[in-house]
């Protein structure tokens, strides 16, 4: 089982993403803010992070830059999730270190293919307690 951290403040989006990931056989850690995510990342190392660009407090792209600057989390792929669909928004997400970018309303097929493409058929958990 592969662990995915989903950082999303919208309840419906969190539920949709989490349900789909669980149906794919992944374990989901959920955070509603960058601060919650940072706390979880002290304890767990997910195989993938999916982050909403517009979060309360610290935004998702700032969080992504911090993750990419930290040696312990730099190698974790980050996928941006946003309601803003312009090329400038995509470029900003990719420039912050995201490996992929998805727009809302979310296509469940795109989410599934993106996650599958990034994680393949990993059957062992990529999460570990960092203590």
Image: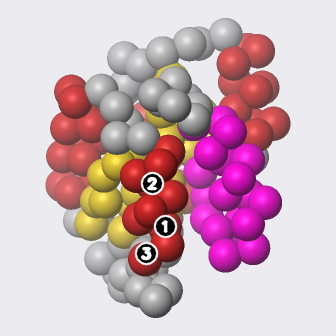
Q: In this view of the protein, which residue sits in the foreground, 78 or 53? A: 53
Residue 67 shown left or right of residue 35 in the figure? right
Q: Which residue, given by chain and number where applicable, does mark 1 sit on?
A: 41
Would residue 7 be seen by someone viewing this image from the given angle? yes
Q: Secondary structure at mark 3?
A: loop
- Of residues 97 and 58, the one drawn nearer to the viewer in this rendering: 58
Q: Image check: 99 left or right of 112?
A: right
Location of mark 2 (residue)? 37
Q: Which residues are magenta?
A: 60-78
Q: Are marks 1 and 2 in contact (CB under 8 Å)?
A: yes
- Mark 1 near mark 3, Cβ–Cβ under 8 Å? yes
Magenta segment: does it hold 68?
yes
42, above or below 58, in the image: below
Residue pointed to by mark 3 = 44
Residue 86: x and y in percent read 67, 10
Graded by Cα atoms within 10 Å as few (under 14), some (14 to 19) or many (20 or more), the crowding at tag 2 reads many
**Residue depicted at 42% across the width and 19% down the height:** 104
Q: Quadrant of residue 126?
A: bottom left
């Amino acid at each position: 089982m592969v662990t995915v951290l989903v950082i999303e403040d919208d309840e419906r989006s969190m539920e949709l993403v989490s349900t789909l990931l669980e149906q794919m056989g992944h374990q989901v850690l959920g955070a509603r803010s960058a601060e919650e995510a940072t706390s979880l990342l002290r304890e767990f190392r997910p195989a993938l992070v999916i982050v909403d660009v517009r979060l309360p407090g610290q935004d998702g792209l700032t969080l992504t830059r911090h993750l990419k600057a930290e040696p312990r989390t730099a190698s974790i792929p980050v996928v941006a999730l946003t309601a803003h669909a312009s090329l400038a928004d995509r470029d900003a997400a990719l420039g912050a270190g995201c490996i992929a970018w998805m727009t809302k309303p979310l296509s469940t097929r795109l989410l599934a293919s993106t996650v599958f493409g990034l994680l393949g058929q990993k059957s062992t958990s990529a999460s570990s307690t960092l203590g």
